[in-house]
């Protein structure tokens, strides 16, 4: 087996699982009745900032981008958005506003 064949095989071993993961990923958006996209984007920005502040308070230096506080920030952002009356709806689905993520 030549070096080129080995490289090609290694690439396929890396690319195939990544393609499967990308297909498996689902995107969600926050929806609330009678709310414009601009208002929803502002609420997401606000909730993310508040979540960042709280995660940094809880995790300190470990709460930085991609640190131990990342799952905490995501959970706090979700909590904030739900408290503002939003529902996470899968993008491209015809799910009603009452279904969550």
Image (spheres, rainbow, N blue to C red):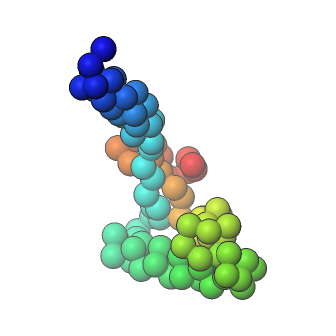
Q: How many numbered marks appear?
A: 0
Extreme-front residue of the structure: 2
To which quarter of the image does residue 18 belong?
top left
Extreme-right residue of the structure: 58
Give above or below for 19 relative to 31: above
Give above or below for 23 relative to 91: above
Residue 61 seen from this side: yes
Does 86 sit left or right of 14 as displayed? right
Give above or below for 9 relative to 83: above
Q: Where is residue 15 in the image (x, y as percent from the top left)?
A: 35, 33
Name the residue nearer the viewer: 49 or 69. Answer: 69
Name the residue nearer the viewer: 74 or 63. Answer: 63
Residue 79 seen from this side: no
Q: Where is residue 28 in the image (x, y as percent from the top left)?
A: 45, 52
Name the residue nearer the viewer: 10 or 34. Answer: 10
Q: Position of residue 68 (x, y in %)?
A: 67, 67
| Residue visible at 63% across and 85% down in the picture | 53
To which quarter of the image does residue 26 belong?
top left
| Residue visible at 51% across and 55% down in the picture | 88
Does 63 sit left or right of 81 as displayed? right
Q: Where is residue 62 in the image (x, y as percent from the top left)?
A: 68, 75
The quadrant of the rendering that contains the N terminus is: top left
């Amino acid at each position: 087996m030549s070096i080129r064949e080995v490289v090609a095989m290694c690439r396929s071993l890396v690319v195939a699982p990544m393609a499967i993961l990308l297909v498996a990923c689902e995107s969600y958006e926050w929806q609330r009745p009678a709310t414009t996209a601009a208002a929803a984007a502002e609420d997401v920005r606000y909730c993310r900032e508040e979540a960042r502040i709280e995660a940094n308070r809880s995790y300190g230096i470990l709460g930085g981008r991609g640190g131990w506080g990342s799952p905490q920030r995501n959970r706090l952002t979700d909590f904030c958005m739900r408290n503002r009356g939003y529902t996470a709806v899968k993008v491209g689905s015809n799910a009603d506003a009452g279904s969550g993520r």
